[in-house]
Structure formats: structure tokens, C-alpha cells
Amino acid sequence: MAEAKRSLNYEASFIISKPGSDPQPYLWRHGVSEDGIEMEHLDQQNGPGREVVRIGNNVSYFESHRPAYTLASGYILGPLPHVLLNEPMSLLDAYEFVVVGKGRISGRAAQQIRMVSKDKSRFGYNLWLDHKTGLPLKINMMDIKGQKIEQIQITTLDVTDTPSAFFERIDTNALPEVVQLPDSKENKQNWQLGFVPVGMEQVKHSVRQLPENGGPLEYIMISDGLVDVSVYLQRATATASESDIVARFGSDIYYSRVQGSVLVTVIGKIPASTANALASSITLVQ
């Protein structure tokens, strides 16, 4: 799958379906130039639009609500799970990959593969890969009860010998300049997670001051490369709810609870039980 995603010339249409939201259609193009440079284009088809163009390790974002900009990156920030598509072997610590059987997706023969969280702390996935090319045809996210909660479905796929003519029309000199991001500032970590799901690790940490003397807000992100989970910590106030607050928005959980003197909020595509385990494991850094 990873080799096919990087090396083939193709154009695909796909739809993302989430509970409570209208299906979102996308156009996805990929090509490799004569010089061996990867080119990619992702276009959101509904609404005000969002287009992304990647040429090598530069990704340019064009959105209606902000000026265009370019980031130095080898992948597009978007709905496609880039680690799964580009580095599936890196997920072996967190998931078991099980070959299930064969099927047919959008008129193409497909191999079905099931991804199962090794410690049952995350949702699972059902993948269907094109039998001929290895490209993904469908990705279903499944909750702990086996119910589908999110889907990426390829509707058309055209694999060609040469890149799409779309890439010939791109003037690379006219693309926005690369934004130079400031170096991240290291902050003292006051809180730590006593529980981290198998295969996940802390990838971000920051502290910022809330307005009107709201005190510090500490932020921790953990990830397995496929799922990112954000944990926010701030001083609990007298108005904070004594009961846990749990809400689900599509495949995302919002979980908030008071743990001692701190209000912990966990957000991510995980079961509520995992969010509870994360929030309950918060301790002061010794």
C-alpha cells in the first residue's frame, strides 16, 4: 500500500461519512514527475472549498478564510490517515493486522484487512485494498461494539501511466513561500500521564496562560501515529462540575473530570473508557 501510494500516478474521488454530518466529497490526485518528485492534490468539493497541493516536501494550502500558505512537509494535513498510508509498519506496536478475506469495492477486486487495537484502548479499522495496485479503496473506523462510526470510501479510481495534466499547469514559482515556524519553546511539565495506551507516546507539550488570571493551561498530546489524543489540564474552580462530563461528536470523545485540584479534559477518537483511564491517571511530576 505504501509503495503504491508513493509511486503510482492516479486520480480518485472519495467520500467521507461521519454520524450527524453530511457526506464530504473529495478529489485526490497523485503523480510522480520525470525527475522522481512526488506531486499531490487534494480538493474538497463541497462548501467554500479547500485545496492542497504538495510538490515534493512543500505543501501549499488554499482556503477561503485565510491567505494561502506553504509548509515544509512530506504529507498533507487532511482527512487521509497519512501514517497508515505511508508507514503502516510503524503501527505494529499498537495494532494487529488480520487478513480477513476478499471483496469488491467500487467495481474493483479488494483485499480486506482488519486492524485491532492490541490493548483494546482504541477503535478498530477495516481496510479494503485494491487487489491490483494495493491502493486503499475503503477505510471504516469501528467502535468497540463493532459499529461503523466513520468511513472513507473511494468511488472512482483511475491509475495512469503518466501524471494528470493538472500538475503541468502548476507554476511552482507562483506558490506561496514556505512559512518558517518558530522553534517550539520548552516549558516545565507539571503533570504527567500514569497511563498511556500500548503503542502511544507523548508527542507534544505546551503551557500557556489563560486570560483574566485564569491560571496556566497545560496541554499534552499523545499519539500512535494514527490517532492523536489531546489532554488539557487547568486549575479546577469552584464552578467546575463534580460529575464527569462525557460527550461524543461523531467519532470524537469529549471527556472532562475534576481530578484532585485539576480539571482534566480529554479529546480524541477513543472510547470513553480510555478517556477516563487517561484522566484518572494524571499525577504531579515529582
Image: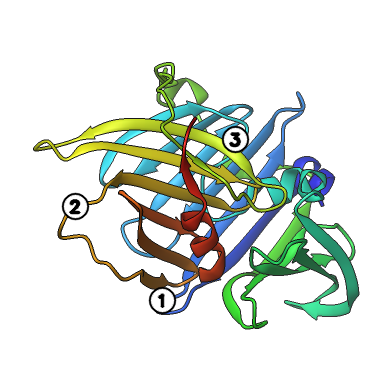
Location of residue 271 with respect to 41 vertically, above or below: below
- Marks 2 and 3, how far apart at CA: 58 Å
Residue 168 numbered tag: 3
Q: Earlier in the sequence, mark 2 or mark 3?
A: 3
Residue 286 image offset from top left, x and y in percent:
49, 30
Residue occupying the point 45% across, 72% down: 250
Residue 221 image offset from top left, x and y in percent:
50, 42
- Marks 1 and 3, how far apart at CA: 33 Å
- Badge 3 crowding class, 10 Å Cα cut-off, few under 14, some 14 to 19, many 20 or more, is few
Residue 237 numbered tag: 2
Residue type of the residue flagged with mark 3: Glu
Q: Secondary structure at mark 2?
A: loop
Residue 22 numbered tag: 1
User: Which of 199/240 is in front?
Assistant: 240
Residue occupying the point 83% across, 44% down: 3
On screen, residue 243 versus residue 78, left or right, reads left
- Badge 2 crowding class, 10 Å Cα cut-off, few under 14, some 14 to 19, many 20 or more, is few
